[in-house]
Image: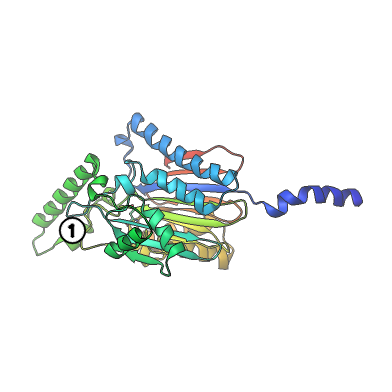
Amino acid sequence: MVALVAIAGFLTPLEASEHKFAIAIHGGAGAIAKSKMTPEKETKYKAKLTEATNAGYEILAAGGSSLDAINRAVNILENSPLFNAGKGAVYTYDGAHELDASIMDGRNKQAGAVSGVKHIKNPINLARLVMTESVHVMLSGQGAEEFALEQGVQLINNSHFDTDNRYKSLLRAKKKLKQLKDKSDSNKDYQANYRQLDSQYKMGTVGAVAVDKHGNVAAATSTGGMTAKRYGRIGDSPVIGAGTWADNNSCAVSATGHGEYFIRYSVASDICARVQYQGKSVEEASKEVIFGPMFKAGGTGGVIVIDPKGNIALTFNTKGMYRGSRVEGETAKVAIFK
Ligand code: ASP
């Protein structure tokens, strides 16, 4: 008995105070055409996904917080032109870039978000400052940038986000919108036609979720939104409960997809509510939501989900989702297609 207690006592510090840590990231979901994915392109994407996954993992392995881990992973993706966030942000209809981001802390449900910012290199960092240094949850546009200045964040020129590829996408989207307009017999305008744009114009967001050694979960999402968006359109990414959610009582979620649907179906919080109140696994809950009524209504996209035990679900109803994950003691896994 004494021996057993001694053994139990010997094991206790590890088991009682440390949780299995893990991280998952995404770089957008959508109609990723396999035919257009050259081996070189695929290698580039996978290398960046691996880099971001491992960078977050290293922070967790060193005992760092889930917030620091997701922040770091998202920064790496924001600084890459490959993804529709930060440097690689898509163009608005008027040829500029407007960025959205949000972050949530599962310990206390503190959250911060920014929307429609034009001069912030890493919007996720500003969202985090909104969470920790302001009394608000979401700041938008010019006001968010005034707050950034007060916090010592340097504003940059909007042209920092210019890239050839995204510009070509804008031109293609506008051409398509014009064709749709010309084809329609009535006064169908941008509103109706935008709905018909292919999902390739509506994807690319980045995000991360993690659980640290203390069992705390966190989630972050950052995006340039949708190509040719107009009128100050804001998607789900900065909306807490839609694009981002984290609660130690259930799970953490970062979403990507057609934002209007994700807002209307409160995707991120709905998944965690199923985990919390119905005892579902993150896998079951995310499948129910991603393939449920939202999908039937036309909502496409995906989510990455993690719970305090380190269980991960990477669920999407599209052809692919850029994704990566790494659980304590394992190597990083990255994938693009199903
Ligand atoms: N959800 C983002 C938005 O609607 C886009 C995306 O995830 O690709 O703004």
Can you tell which quarter of the image residue 136 is in?
bottom left
The residue singled out by tag 1 in the image is 193
Q: Is residue 81 above or below residue 174?
A: above
Q: Is residue 44 left or right of residue 107?
A: left
Q: Residue at x 76, y 51 (%)?
A: 12
Q: Position of residue 293 (x, y in %)?
A: 40, 63
Kind of residue indicated by mark 1: Asn
Q: Is residue 112 left or right of residue 251?
A: left
**Number of marks drawn:** 1
Rendering quadrant holding ligand 1 = bottom left
Q: Position of residue 149 (x, y in %)?
A: 33, 58
Q: Residue at x 62, y 40 (%)?
A: 329
Can you tell which quarter of the image residue 82 is in?
top left
Q: Is residue 295 left or right of residue 19?
A: left
Q: Secondary structure at mark 1?
A: helix
Q: Position of residue 163 (x, y in %)?
A: 24, 42
In this rendering, does residue 184 appear at all?
Answer: yes
Task: Give the crowd class for mark 1: few <14, some 14-19, many >=20 residues within 10 Å.
Answer: some
In this rendering, does residue 298 appear at all?
Answer: no
Q: Is residue 40 above or below residue 211?
A: above
Quadrant where the image shows the C terminus: top left
Q: Closest to the observer: 133 or 6?
A: 133
Q: Residue at x 28, y 53 (%)?
A: 119
Q: Position of residue 256 (x, y in %)?
A: 38, 53
